Amino acid sequence: MSGEVLGSIFNQNGYSTARMRAVWSDENLLKTVCQVETAVAYAMSKNKKIPLSAYEEIKEKVVPENYDLTKLRLAAARSGHFLAGFVSYSQQLFDDGAGQYLHYGAASEDVEDTCYVLQLKQADKILMDYLVKFGSVLYDLADRYKKTISVAIAHRTYSSPSTLGFKLGIILNE
């Protein structure tokens, strides 16, 4: 069991959601790295930097189903870097020399940054879904309480009364 809050089956839902944890999971990272490495191979083959046959083999073999996460974690630990371990582990997937073209032409930072942005896009979709739901609830509450008087305090002074609906509308507008 992890010592981290999100690794705790008892506490994790208080700090995250299952959907968001799935975005940042090892499985999704592997899937994203496979997609990015395949895209790099595609671009390199289109620019005639690697053989088309190498791209085809990378596309076929560099898929999450071909990886054992425990063995991949060990390869990453031995190499001291996730992508170095990924490339090292991936070499066993290839029968001929096509594996030499995996990760060819890209710095590890390029792959990591691209993966990170793709995962951020996934996370953004989740956040936007929640914001739309939250906005809908605020809209309903602002409408429901549009005539409910609410006292306001500003700088330790009572200000003009307004309505709770108005205050919620301000939050919704923000």
Image: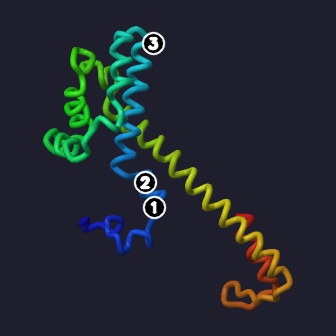
Front residue of 23/145: it is 23
Q: Splitting the image into 4 quarters, where does residue 132 fall? A: bottom right
The image's mark for residue 18 is: 1
Q: In which quarter of the image is the N terminus?
A: bottom left
The CA span between labels 2 and 3 is: 33 Å
Report helix, strand or loop for mark 3. helix
Mark 3 near mark 1, Cβ–Cβ under 8 Å? no
Q: Mark 1 near mark 2, Cβ–Cβ under 8 Å?
A: yes
Residue at the left extreme, as displayed: 78
Q: How far apart are marks 3 and 1 (CA)?
A: 38 Å
> Dot 2, how many residues are within 10 Å of its Cα: few (below 14), some (14-19), or many (20+)?
some
Residue 138: x %, y % from top left: 72, 71
Q: What residue type is labelled 3?
A: Lys
Q: Where is residue 9 drawn, in percent x and y? A: 34, 70
Give the quadrant of residue 81: top left
Amino acid under disc 1 = Ala
In the rendered view, tell whether residue 152 sits above or below residue 29: below
Is residue 90 positioned above or below 170 on the image? Answer: above
Q: Residue beneath label 3, please? A: 46
In the current view of this chain or complex, which residue is farthest to the front? 65
Q: Is residue 112 left or right of residue 137?
A: left
- Left or right of 155 on screen, residue 16: left
